[in-house]
Image: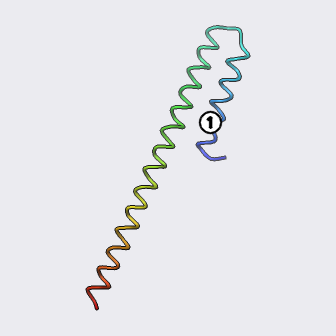
Amino acid sequence: MSTLEFYQTRAAQCAREAEATNLVNVKERLLNARLAWLQMAERLERTNEARAVGLAHKAEATALAAREAEMATN
């Protein structure tokens, strides 16, 4: 299970438990926890997307540098 899946699973579990309880303070705590898990999942998704973009840019820069070096030697 990936970290993202773990966060999403925990959020879903908190939602189910909040639905099942009759205690207001417990329901509130579980809904707050659900929100925190969802926020961590969203933050991780943004981080993964930014990392992928960064790696793509680095690969492009490396390829460009290789082409320029090859052109310089010819």
Instruction: Work out whether 56 lies above or below 10.
Output: below
- Residue visible at 71% across and 23% down? 16
Q: At which x and y percent is residue 66?
A: 35, 78
Q: Residue furthest right?
A: 20
In the image, what residue occupies the spot 67% across and 46% down? 1
Q: Secondary structure at mark 1?
A: helix
Toward which corner of the image does residue 26 lie, by quadrant?
Answer: top right
Q: Position of residue 37 (x, y in %)?
A: 56, 31
Q: Which residue is mark 1?
A: 8
* Frontmost residue, 70 versus 27: 70
Looking at the rendering, which quadrant does residue 22 occupy?
top right
The residue lying toward the viewer, choosing from 40 and 59, is: 59
Q: What residue appears at the point 58 percent right and 24 percent down from the top-left corner?
A: 33
The structure's colour scheme is rainbow
What amino acid is labelled 1 in the image?
A: Gln
Return the x and y of residue 24 as percentages of the image width and height. Answer: 63, 8
In percent of width and height, residue 46 lies at 46, 43
15 with respect to 49 (left or right): right
Image vertical order of residue 9 relative to residue 1, above or below: above
Left or right of 71: which side holds 41? right
Left or right of 33? Residue 53 is left
Callout count: 1
Bin the neighbour count of mark 1 within 10 Å (Cα to Cα): few under 14, some 14-19, many 20 and up: some
On the rendered image, what quadrant is the C terminus found in?
bottom left
The residue at the point 41 percent across, 67 percent down is 59
